[in-house]
Amino acid sequence: MENKSLKILLIEDDEDDAFYIKDILNEGLGSPLPNVEHFSSVDKNLKQINPFDYDLALFDYRLGKTNGIELVRNFRHQNCNIPIILMTGQGDQEVAVEAMKAGVTDYLTKGKLSIESVTKSIRYVLGLHKEAELRKQAEEKLKKSHAQLAIAYEELQTSIGKLETAQKQIIISEKLAGIGRLVAGVCHEILNPLNIISGHTQTLLMERVTDKPLKLDLNSIMEEIGRITKIITGLLKFSRKGNIELKSSNIVKELESVLILVEKDMLLEGIEIVRDFESTSARVMVDTDGIRQVFLNLLNNAKHAISNGGTLTISTEIKISGSNLQSIPTEETPSSKLNKTFQIKFIDTGAGIKKDDLEKVFEPFFTTKPEEKGTGLGLSISYSIIERHGGILEIDSKVGVGTTVIINLPIQD
């Protein structure tokens, strides 16, 4: 026995049997003597009995209106799992089976009670109870470990995802930076002879007004010169890394100013624009010309993707994150340690982008549009502009479902 006084609940309506059982318990359990609390009836005393106050219970089977098995069920219904020994005047197998089903831990015949049998039974039920408690603790520890492992795994997957995203961002940035350095020098060299060609072509157009076949050819040359100029101008914008002027602006108003320019044309083509704007008064440090150019590029891309009609949903919200991933400041994570980001999503119901193409969308000159519809510089320029704002531009797309473009811009408190 453990070196502590057991608190035992004894419910026995026969005073002589109760006295005898107490003697057996005192003699069999020895020092320290058990603390036996005896009740001769259940009906009047059941409400004042707290089953969780005891280490062990002994019930007589016959207790007047309420028998011992019903009392066992009552205890177990209260989620009380203390060991319970049921005693009967005679060994009835059916009663024993019913008692075990009700949750009795052991079963004794009163006619065979002795110091040895009672002590043995008590040792047995206490041993079972201890094993059950240890098993329960082990299960709780296992559940806790499993939960911690699941959280750790989820955090690991999140970290891996962030790392993969960061690696992709670095690769794209390095690639764009290399191209930017290359085109910065090349574009100026191209513009000089291009201007000369344009000048001579315009002179010929003025001199040979009557030569219609030649005039058609010269106009075609001027169209291509205009196309080359447009491409070079885009490349120059892409290559200029330091020429942005940040100022505090209402980002939603800037977005609306661009939407006004394209919304009517989109409606004519059967494209519905859905606004889901939150934090409409949020101010972000941006270069207004640059950010408008990004918005216009993304809206034009969406317009092309859903040219046969569909929906373009534009949403805005402030995203808040910190070291403990809470969405609001707390005493442990003050607002100064939380990262605030203004997120803008462009979600279209267009044809989507193939997986192989999705990896190339930020590369200059890559486009899924027909040659006459685009230069392939819109997304690369947009990426470069957002990067210079300290933000991130991401694209997710599924063929047949649509495309989501996400802009995350940092908010400075």
Image: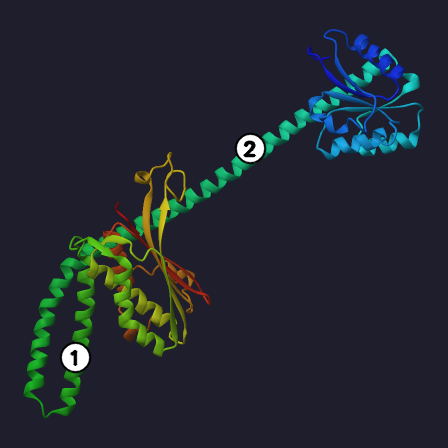
276 left or right, relative to 51: left
Near-viewer residue (78 or 273): 78
x then y, percent, for residue 42: 81, 27
x then y, percent, for residue 206: 6, 86
Mark 1 vs mark 2, foreground winner is: 2
Residue type beneath disc 1: Ile
Identify the residue shown where x is 39% and y is 47%.
Answer: 164
Measured in 3D between alpha carbons, the distance from the residue under mark 1 to the one under mark 2, in whole angstroms, is 73 Å
117 left or right, relative to 408: right
57 left or right, relative to 148: right
Residue 366 seen in this snapshot = no
Identify the residue shown where x is 67% and y is 27%.
Answer: 135
Q: Residues within 10 Å of mark 1 (few under 14, many from 20)?
A: some
Q: Residues within 10 Å of mark 2 (few under 14, many from 20)?
A: few
Q: Which residue is mark 1?
A: 221
Identify the residue shown where x is 29% and y is 74%.
Answer: 373
Residue 116 figure quarter = top right
Residue 5 figure quarter = top right
